Image (cartoon, rainbow, N blue to C red):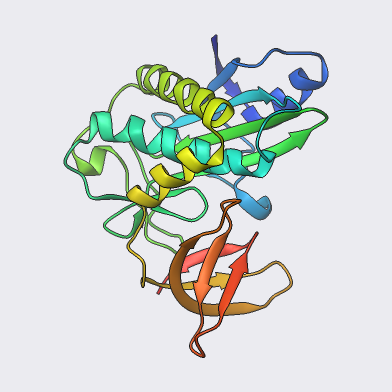
Amino acid sequence: MIRTVTETGSTNADLIALARSGAEEGLWLRAERQTGGRGRQGRAWVSPEGNLYASTIVRLRPSDPPAATLALVAAVALEEAVRIWLPDAPILLKWPNDLLIAGAKLSGILLERVDNAVVIGIGVNIAHHPTDIERSATSMAAQGAAPEPGQFLETLAETFSRWLERWRGEGIGAIRDRWTARAHPEGTALQARLGDGVVIDGLYAGLNGDGALILRLADGTRHVIHAGDVFLI
């Protein structure tokens, strides 16, 4: 089910409250505008009308794979949805769940745990993209297609439902394989900025069994990244 509101502070914040009140899995909340949108690590997410700002709830089950791997589920579902509208665009996934087109960021995904649920917020630059940020950004419109946000969300809700079912039925392996097939190639130079201020440069060497990022360092050793900001260098 998709609910749409004209304006809210944050769809994630709203769904966290609804999750605590017993909202069921499968609910999507979309806002035409957000006044307090958030990205990873508390960053503000600029929210002009015409882009997608939506969140959904996943209710965790005892047999589910690790909750953190829902980041990869969201990424592959979003990549598939965007590719339906932009079939010829050179879309790449960057760990854990950024979509890039020609190196420019198209979207953002934020996961927040609340009790036995995970709220997944997804923002996609459909009609607009920022030009005054550290990393370059792009939009679907700049790449040749600008669907109405509600119409795009219908596509995304369908792809997300299918990949969530595979995550539950087949485990993280199927998701990891799809993610890897859509990511930058092994050997791509990456920089990981960890929460404690540590910066690690290395070459992309795939994902481990739990979906964590593996970097091959200059001395030949491998370092596993479970959380942090990752940049192409």
Task: Kindly tell me whether residue 126 is visible in this rendering.
Answer: no
For residue 147, what is the image quadrant? top left
Placement of the N terminus among the 4 image quadrants: top right
Question: Which of the two residues, 188 or 82, is positioned nearer the viewer here?
Answer: 188
Q: Residue at x 50, y 44 (%)?
A: 108
Task: Kindly tell me whether residue 45 is visible in this rendering.
Answer: yes
Image coordinates of residue 62 in percent, x first then y, are 76, 27
Question: Which of the two residues, 137 or 103, is positioned nearer the viewer here?
Answer: 103
Q: Residue at x 55, y 82 (%)?
A: 221
Q: Is residue 200 above or below residue 36?
A: below
Q: Residue at x 75, y 18 (%)?
A: 18
Placement of the C terminus among the 4 image quadrants: bottom left
Question: Which of the two residues, 106 or 68, is positioned nearer the viewer here?
Answer: 68
For residue 199, what is the image quadrant? bottom right
Question: Which of the two residues, 51 or 82, is positioned nearer the viewer here?
Answer: 82
Image coordinates of residue 174 in percent, x first then y, are 46, 38
Image coordinates of residue 64 in percent, x first then y, are 67, 30
The residue positioned farthest toward the top in the image shown: 1
Image coordinates of residue 121 in percent, x first then y, are 58, 34
Q: Residue at x 34, y 49 (%)?
A: 181
Q: Is residue 60 above or below residue 221?
A: above
- Going by the image, does 223 lie left or right of 140? right
